[in-house]
Amino acid sequence: MTTVDIRSAQLDPALGDAAVLAAVAGVAGGQLAPLATRIDHEGHYPLEVMAALGRAGAFAGHLRRNGERYGLALGSMHEISRHCGSTGFLTWAHDVCGLYLEQSGNPALDGQLLDDHVSGRSFGGTGLSNPMKAFAGIERMLLRARQVPGGYRVSGALPWVSHIGPGQYFGAIASVYRDDQSHSHDIIFLVRCDQQVVLRQCPEFSGMEGTSTWGVRLEDYFVGEDNMIADPARPFIEKIRAAFILLQIGMATGLIQGALDSMRDVEPLLGHVNQFLDDRPDELEAEYLELAGRVARLTGSPFDGSKDYLLDVLDARAQGAELALRATQSALLHQGARGYLINSAPQRRVREAHFAAIVTPAIKHLRSEMARLSRDEVPA
């Protein structure tokens, strides 16, 4: 197994993508794969694996200091999700939290904290599900802030935030209100899960139980300069939105690849009857390769602010989720009864693909945004 041990958030420039991907694949196939059932079904939160992935360089590629190698970041997430969709999701949450820290330009966030985060010495996720839906008009913003000397006081509750726990952290957005209760603007900031932050157990999910997902309650939580990511938040979100969504596609492609692996595993034994099924592996692989080509082109300009680029990212993200749904269902049908066992990889991947289809932005959210952006502007 190739080993790449990074001691900071800075990847060695001489270290090619292939070496990092080999190291990540070694951790994913060796240390992670045997734990997938415990993570999905029993709720094991695999921080020991995340630490190993950090040492291998899995969380560093997309950073500006490492050349914004989004192809490497997506490739790493692909290899991880191929073996465990829950850990693929943790990887995405960790990656976008790193993106917030670096893009903040705040020395308190993009220095030692970012080094520790990217190297797997500390862990944090993202609480932007509600704000992203609020910005699209789907929900109302759940966190409210008021300005006070030295910063802001934030109150409210988020129903679920993943990849957090005591001593960890996550990015969040709150709407700032004036004394007369009129809306002023929004802020994005880092929440540190200390004694001021109440973590509440979530209802049991059908899978993905090892993602350490909690309800979060803030009551007059103080946000000072050291924890400010951007004030105001909207220009920051406009800048990173496409990158935020693009990074998710690695979850879908990994699930598709895992499904193809499961189909081909049983081809020597069941190919004679599986030939009568729809969505055969060669057909799905052709669609996957077309999607992979589209995504590879998009990774070259993750901060392209054009409407056409964002539309392409949204469409690729939707295509990935939809293909993951088809591929994981087909893999279960190809495997038959053995694929219906509760601890089987095809059974687990069906649940993981459902998650990829509903996590923000969900397929319906993606289609709504594409329709809005595609609508012709008619002068008043």
Image (tube, helix red, strand yellow):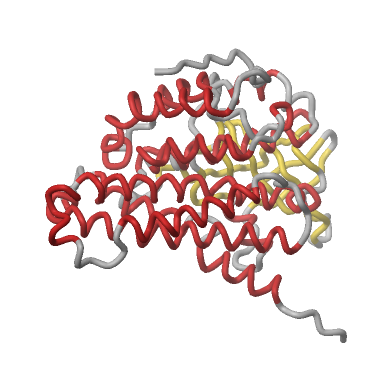
Q: x, y (%) of residue 133?
A: 61, 61
Q: Is residue 320 left or right of residue 227?
A: left
Taking the spot 60% from the left edge, 39% from the top edge, the residue there is 71
Q: Is residue 239 left or right of residue 1?
A: right
Q: Is residue 286 left or right of residue 182?
A: left
Taking the spot 69% from the left edge, 52% from the top edge, the residue there is 241
Q: Note whether 141 is above or below 71 in the view shown.
A: below
| Quarter in which the C terminus is drawn | bottom right
Taking the spot 58% from the left edge, 45% from the top edge, the residue there is 247
The image quadrant that residue 179 belongs to is bottom right
Taking the spot 79% from the left edge, 30% from the top edge, the residue there is 106
Q: Does the image show residue 296?
A: yes
Q: Note whether 213 is above or below 20 in the view shown.
A: below
Q: x, y (%) of residue 111?
A: 73, 21
Q: x, y (%) of residue 315?
A: 58, 63
The single residue placed furthest to the bottom in the displayed view is 380
Q: Nearer the viewer, residue 184 or 125?
A: 125
Q: Does the image show residue 186?
A: no
Q: Nearer the viewer, residue 222 or 380?
A: 380
Q: Note whether 103 is above or below 320 in the view shown.
A: above
Q: Note whether 153 is above or below 324 in the view shown.
A: above
Q: Nearer the viewer, residue 26 or 59?
A: 26
Q: x, y (%) of residue 82?
A: 38, 41
Q: So how many labels did they put on this image?
A: 0
